[in-house]
Image (cartoon, helix red, strand yellow):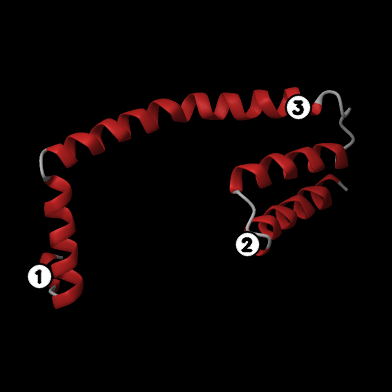
Amino acid sequence: MQFLVLLLGIALLLLLIIKVKMNTFVALILTAFIVALGLGMNPADVPGTITKGIGSAMGELAVVFSFGAMIGRLVSDAGGSYRISETLINFSVRRDCSLL
């Protein structure tokens, strides 16, 4: 039964994102709430559990995102983004496979 609730939750998430065009974060929170209730969790415990789960995941990813943003800014300031875009444009327009 739990597996079925999980599958229905995934289907609901995809439906909300693809068909309804709902914001991905809002769809994820709504689906998490519905799946938690479907699995029999106490409704009063659901918000705390979602917050704890998202908080721990975002806490780990925040460092990766921060370093990625810093490296991206350094590449952009050094002119690397212009060079990368020029190379990709030339590669796609000319179909020059010598870069590979």
Distance between mark 2 and mark 1 Cα atoms: 38 Å
Image spot of residue 16 (x, y percent): 69, 56
Taking the image as shown, residue 53 lies to the left or right of residue 32, namely: left
Q: Which residue is drawn at 13% across and 60% down?
A: 86
Tag 2 near tag 1, CB within 8 Å: no
Amino acid identity at mark 3:
Pro
The first of marks 2 and 1 along the sequence is 2
Q: Are marks 3 and 2 in contact (CB under 8 Å)?
A: no
Q: Is mark 2 on a helix, strand or loop?
A: helix
The residue mark sitting in front, 2 or 1, is: 2
Instruction: From the top left corner, tell me how far across and down residue 13 is, in percent.
Output: 69, 52
Question: Which residue is nearer to you in this view: 48 or 1?
Answer: 48
The residues tagged by marks 3 and 2 sit, at their Cα atoms, a distance apart of: 25 Å
Vertical placement of 22 versus 55: above or below? below
Q: Residues within 10 Å of mark 1 (few under 14, many from 20)?
A: few
The image quadrant of residue 57 is: top right
Quarter holding the C terminus is: bottom left
Pointer 2 residue:
18
Which image quadrant for residue 29?
Answer: top right
Q: What residue type is labelled 2?
A: Ile
Residue tagged 3: 47
Disc ID at residue 98 = 1
The kind of residue tagged 1 is: Ser
Left or right of 71? Residue 33 is: right
